[in-house]
Image: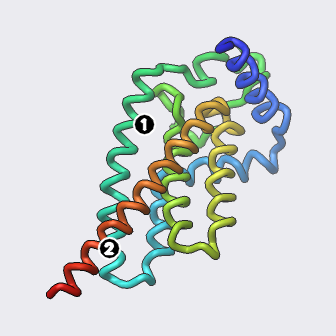
Amino acid sequence: MIFWLRHIDHSLFFFINNGLSSSLMDDVFVALSSLGSWTVILITFALLFHDGARKLRLHFVSFFGVGLVVLMVLLNSKSLIGFDRPLRVYRWELYTGQVTINLPEGKTPGNKGLPSGHTTMAFFALVYASRFKPKARFPLYLLASSIGFARIYVGAHFPSDCLVGAVLGTGGALLAAWVFGQIERKLCRLRTQT
């Protein structure tokens, strides 16, 4: 069963990385691929900035509090699971051109692949923002999904790495939004009691 799933995972990787490759798409997806780091956090807080200083502080506490937990799960998962990235699995295919690693210069990832950190971060930040900005929900989900897809396209990750990252990031975002609601309710109760 695991062998069959890995076979599907690798076949899908080849289709996205090699089958869809074009010079125009390369530029788009290389740019999207790099958004999954600190840029999505900036986008999230830019969207939440207009909620006011008090709510912004609560967002900061819930987002980064749960974000640290998500980060610890992410890093421990990478070391415990230990799945290699395409760069290490397909060395011969890289040499022959069947696999393309199209990352910005000097950005060759050295750690393990599962789950994708960029995809986790993208889904965590953008799904969190979507909980408070429902009108922007579809574009935010689309951007997070595009970042995950870009990580496969540029050859940084297998599809399973990005799928697990999306699930981890989304779960973390929902938890952080719940924490925000709990803190806000408790503070509201304290204000009404005084």
For marks 2 and 1, give the CA distance: 27 Å
- Cβ atoms under marks 2 and 1 closer than 8 Å: no
How many C-alpha atoms fall within 10 Å of the one at disc 1: few (<14), some, or many (≥20)?
A: many
Secondary element at image label 1: helix
Q: Nearer the viewer, residue 8 or 180?
A: 180
Question: Is 29 situated above or below 94?
Answer: below
Q: Position of residue 31 (x, y in %)?
A: 64, 53
Tag 1 residue: 74
Tag 2 residue: 184
Q: Quadrant of residue 96?
A: top right
From this viewpoint, is residue 39 visible?
Answer: no
Question: Is 49 situated above or below 23?
Answer: below
Q: Nearer the viewer, residue 63 or 179?
A: 179
Q: Residue at x 43, y 29 (%)?
A: 77
Q: Residue at x 63, y 67 (%)?
A: 137
Pair 2/1: label in front? 2
The amino acid type, in three-letter code, at marker 1 is: Leu
